[in-house]
């Protein structure tokens, strides 16, 4: 019974997701004049398959296996479903009959409907087979994939992004380092901070201190202050400096629903 | 594609908000599936694990801060580079960050009810789409910077390459047969020019099915 409910809901979810992903992917080919949606790596990979339906299909298939192993192990479909499987399989379906990429892969309308179809099939297949997989294989996925993915998120990704920020120039290096370190302290992972550092550093390189870059710096500062407060970083900092935590700060945290341990 | 063809509904700005709404609706409903049936979240294991830590009682702070900051960074970046990153903005922001914020604040209804999950995602997506279109209106003509999008995408691709070797190492630490399976699978996939992460996973699973990993 539960499997039937999961299948029915997956059909709805797959159609919605596939529709959005397909249209967004096709619109990427018209960026920056038209706002697209996907990712630069998705865009690059779609271009790398060069309109060959078999390349698009097999590229998507490789990542379907990744998603399948992950959904079995941890119930997570992986970002590959939206970034790789749906766009590439939609492209493969459309290109099968018409090799002209401008009429198929670059057309948001056709890609949206092909994406919806692929989304229904892929999401339903992944979600419904997850419960039918033997426990020994689920164990492999959780014992092997989870640690590997955790290492990737921390420390591999922070290091790779950090190096990229350092290599991109003095400004991105400094902003990336400072915001990366702060972000690891406050948010528990350096990547968001380094990404923001590259954004600000490159923005300053290209256009200097203008309204947009100033707004960005203020917004980033606000983000750090707010997430630091809500994760009680201020209290932890005072504690590690062995400073008595003032009563008003404890009360301020309480008004937002978080109890502070003294 | 010439200018004439890039007109009409499918290329319009407000259609973009609609596409974001559809996708966000599906992604948020995927998190509903995960919350209720433990399957179907649209994200990578490590990120879903942050939400899981919250569901298990470990606090939603990590998932909320991680998701919200990614969402924020991508909304800034999306209109400037012309491509909204689905992974960071919608899958991590709407699919993990916002649910973590809601659950942390005690609102479970949007995640326990399927129709409410669809509606919540759609409304959030529409809002994000509208914000992006607005930022475009204000900035697109006054800036010619990609804000380092190329640097970030390069780093994103480079980080992805580490996953294959990490899986092999992790498999070897799990058990000897699983480690051998992952090593062989990765080598075979590399020989056929496939991403080695896929081969490592399949190799580990096949051998793991025959020789199960001992539980403690």
Image (spheres, rainbow, N blue to C red):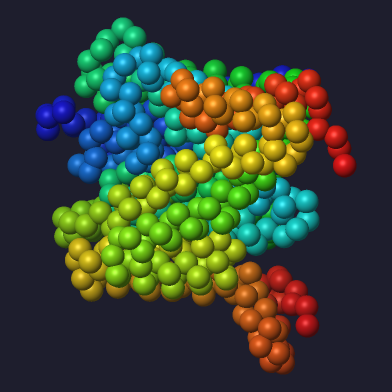
Locate residue A217 relative to residue A249 in the image: left or right.
left
Locate residue B55 relative to residue B74 in the image: left or right.
right
Q: Is residue B80 above or below residue A136?
A: below
Q: Is residue A47 above or below residue A100?
A: below
**Whether residue A80 is visible:** yes
Q: Is residue A128 above or below residue A140?
A: above
Q: How far across and down, in percent of the image, does residue A202 sit?
A: 28, 63
What quarter of the picture does the N terminus of chain A occupy?
A: top right
Q: At x 40% / y 66%, what residue is drawn?
A: A176
In depth, the one of A66 and B25 nearer the eye is A66
Q: At x 45% / y 54%, what residue is drawn?
A: A160
**Whether residue B97 is visible:** no
Q: How far across and down, in percent of the image, does residue B191 sit?
A: 47, 22
Q: Quadrant of residue A186?
A: bottom right
Q: Is residue B179 above or below residue A185?
A: above
Locate residue A186 relative to residue A211 in the image: left or right.
right
């Amino acid at each position: 019974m539960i499997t039937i409910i999961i299948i029915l809901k997956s059909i709805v979810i797959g159609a919605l997701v596939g529709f959005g992903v397909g249209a967004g992917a096709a619109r990427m080919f018209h960026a920056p004049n038209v706002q697209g949606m996907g990712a630069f790596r998705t865009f690059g990979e779609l271009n790398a398959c060069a309109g060959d339906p078999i390349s698009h299909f097999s590229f998507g298939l490789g990542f379907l296996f990744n998603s399948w192993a992950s959904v079995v192990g941890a119930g997570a479909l992986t970002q590959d479903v939206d970034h790789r499987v749906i766009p590439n399989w939609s492209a493969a379906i459309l290109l099968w009959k018409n090799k002209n990429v401008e009429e198929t892969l670059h057309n948001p309308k056709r890609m949206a409907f092909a994406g919806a179809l692929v989304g229904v099939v892929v999401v339903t297949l992944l979600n419904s087979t997850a419960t039918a997989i033997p426990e020994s294989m689920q164990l492999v996925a959780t014992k092997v994939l989870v640690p590997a993915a955790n290492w990737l998120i921390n420390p591999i990704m922070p290091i790779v992004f950090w190096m990229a920020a350092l290599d991109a120039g003095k400004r991105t290096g400094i902003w990336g380092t400072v915001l990366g370190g702060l972000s690891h302290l406050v948010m528990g992972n350096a990547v968001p901070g380094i990404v923001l550092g590259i954004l600000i550093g490159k923005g300053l390189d290209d256009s200097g201190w203008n309204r947009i870059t100033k707004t960005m710096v203020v917004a980033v500062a606000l983000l750090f202050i707010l997430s630091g407060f809500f994760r009680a970083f201020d209290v932890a900092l005072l504690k590690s400096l062995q400073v008595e935590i003032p009563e008003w700060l404890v009360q301020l945290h309480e008004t937002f629903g978080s109890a502070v341990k003294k | 594609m010439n200018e004439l063809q890039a007109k009409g509904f499918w290329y319009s700005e407000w259609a973009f908000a609609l596409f974001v709404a559809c996708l966000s609706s599906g992604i948020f409903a995927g998190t509903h599936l995960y919350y209720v049936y433990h399957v179907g979240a649209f994200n990578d294991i490590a990120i879903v694990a942050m939400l899981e830590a919250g569901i298990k009682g470990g606090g939603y702070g990590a998932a909320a801060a991680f998701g919200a900051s990614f969402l924020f960074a991508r909304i800034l970046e999306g209109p400037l580079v012309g491509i909204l990153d689905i992974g960071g903005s919608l899958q991590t922001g709407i699919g993990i960050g916002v649910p973590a914020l809601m659950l942390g604040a005690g609102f479970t209804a949007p995640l326990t009810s399927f129709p409410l999950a669809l509606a919540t995602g759609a409304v959030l997506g529409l809002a994000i789409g509208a914000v992006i279109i607005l930022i475009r209106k204000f900035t697109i003509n006054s800036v010619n910077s990609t804000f380092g999008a190329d640097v970030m995408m390069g780093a994103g691709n480079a980080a992805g390459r580490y996953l294959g070797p990490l899986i092999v190492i992790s498999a070897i630490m799990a058990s000897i047969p699983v480690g051998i399976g992952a090593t062989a699978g990765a080598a075979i996939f590399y020989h056929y020019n496939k991403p080695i992460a896929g081969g490592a996973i399949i190799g580990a699973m096949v051998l793991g099915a025959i020789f199960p990993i001992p539980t403690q």
